């Protein structure tokens, strides 16, 4: 089949690669002038374990499977990564009950190696930590997301796939039993193909609305949540990732490490109306208070505004977090079309597993 994949973030790249590895002719269209300029390059670069998500959900299934696939790909392709482990920490007895529930969910989801620790056990691992209890996830890690995307792009090219940058897709229509994609950009025109995968992230809903025959009622809302990140001066005080008990809209203001060992904190959750990647420095005061719940030794003046990411959510404040949405022919009735909506965290971790799911749906 000739297949068009729209959106060259990490999920679009993974989907295009998976389809090319199955022998399809693949064109990957990206509106920007480089791959991975949106969600994929503005996140924590964490390889998640999969213990947070409801059992049986797409997020749980693809996170757990995707993490295993991602570690294997990193090993086979020499992609920078480290299985550093993570502690989810409780500052109160109520939060301790919460992380115990996370452990039960993780066990049900097939997450390996989870271990509940008391405060003393956790401090033996991380002496600078303050907590009453913690959940250890030894298989959580970090990855060089840019190297990952370059590896996916390389595999796509090796199998004859084409990457078309600066190529926005204005709309999709049906003609002679095939899909016809209308390209804009520097070389506008039409591209006929047998199947289309909409992995356009922030643009997924708009493209779905411009898809002939796709029911308007199936297009979900797009809700934007900005996450601000702050770097930290000085030597790293921890060797593992440190996460507080989850909060509404996200996993709390957590501590992550990059592959050079530098500490950074975030993201928080700031509901916004338009794409704006400027870090809000006013959020810094709240960061100090949140971080000192588990790291009381954070020095004054140590945080520096770093970067911001935005998540393409399907639900807003006060609403339960939505699952990933994969809308294929079995759901909407149109042949050769898969729409991906709300692919936020843990999308990077889940990307390889999501790609296989999409490829299977097109093969059905």
Image (spheres, helix red, strand yellow):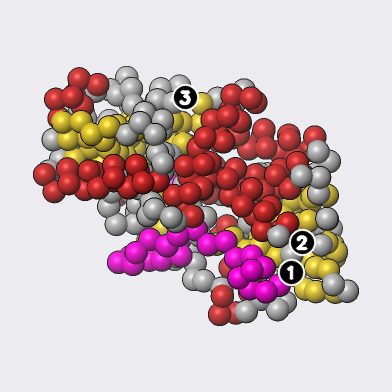
User: What residue appears at the point 46 percent right and 36 percent down from the top-left corner?
Assistant: 47
Circle 2 residues within 10 Å: few <14, some 14–19, many ≥20 = some
C-alpha gap between disc 1 and disc 3: 41 Å
Q: Which residue is mark 2?
A: 195
Q: Quadrant of the N terminus?
A: bottom right
Residue at which label 3 appears: 82
Displayed quadrant of residue 179: bottom right
Q: Nearer the viewer, mark 1 or mark 2?
A: 1
Closer-to-camera residue (134/150): 134
**Residue beneath the point at 63% across and 48% down:** 355
Residue 299, by quadrant, is: top left
Q: Residue at x 18, y 24 (%)?
A: 121
Residue 252 horizontal/vertical position (percent): 30, 46
Checking the image for residue 335, the label placed there is 1
Q: Is residue 6 left or right of residue 266?
A: right
Q: Quadrant of the C terminus?
A: bottom right
Region rendered in magenta: 307-335
Asked whether residue 311 is drawn in magenta, I would say yes
Label located before the other in sequence (1 or 2): 2
Mark 2 and mark 3 lie on one chain; the one further toward the N terminus is 3
Inspect this view and state whether residue 107 appears.
yes
Spatial CA span between label 2 and label 3: 37 Å
């Amino acid at each position: 089949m000739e297949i068009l994949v729209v959106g060259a973030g990490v999920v679009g790249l993974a989907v295009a690669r998976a389809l090319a590895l199955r022998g399809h002719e693949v064109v990957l269209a990206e509106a920007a002038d480089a791959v991975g300029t949106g969600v994929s390059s503005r996140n924590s670069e964490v390889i998640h374990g999969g213990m947070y998500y409801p059992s049986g959900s797409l997020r749980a299934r693809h996170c757990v499977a995707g993490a295993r696939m991602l570690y294997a790909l990193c090993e086979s392709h020499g992609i920078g990564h480290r299985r550093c482990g993570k502690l989810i920490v409780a500052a109160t007895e109520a939060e301790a009950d919460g992380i115990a529930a996370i452990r039960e969910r993780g066990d049900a989801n097939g997450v390996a190696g989870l271990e509940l620790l008391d405060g003393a056990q956790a401090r033996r691992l991380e002496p600078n930590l303050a907590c009453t209890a913690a959940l250890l996830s030894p298989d959580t890690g970090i990855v060089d997301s840019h190297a990952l995307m370059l590896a996916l792009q390389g595999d796509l090219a090796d199998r004859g796939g084409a990457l078309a940058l600066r190529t926005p897709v204005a709309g999709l229509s049906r003609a002679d039993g095939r899909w016809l994609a209308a390209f804009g950009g520097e070389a506008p025109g039409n591209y006929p193909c047998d199947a289309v995968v909409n992995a356009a992230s922030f643009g997924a809903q708009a493209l779905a609305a411009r898809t002939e025959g796709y029911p308007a009622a199936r297009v979900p809302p797009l809700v934007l949540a900005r996450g601000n990140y702050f770097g930290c001066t000085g030597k790293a005080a921890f060797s593992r990732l440190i996460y507080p008990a989850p909060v509404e809209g996200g996993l709390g203001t957590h501590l992550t490490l990059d592959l050079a060992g530098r500490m950074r904190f975030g993201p928080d959750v700031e509901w916004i109306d338009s794409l704006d990647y400027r870090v809000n420095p006013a959020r810094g005061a709240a960061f100090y208070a949140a971080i000192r719940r588990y790291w009381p030794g954070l020095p004054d003046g140590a945080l520096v505004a770093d970067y911001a990411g935005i998540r393409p959510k399907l639900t807003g404040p006060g609403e339960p977090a939505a699952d990933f949405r994969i809308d294929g022919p079995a759901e909407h009735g149109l042949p050769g079309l898969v729409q991906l909506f709300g692919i936020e965290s843990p999308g990077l971790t889940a990307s390889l597993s999501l790609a296989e799911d999409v490829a299977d749906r097109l093969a059905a």
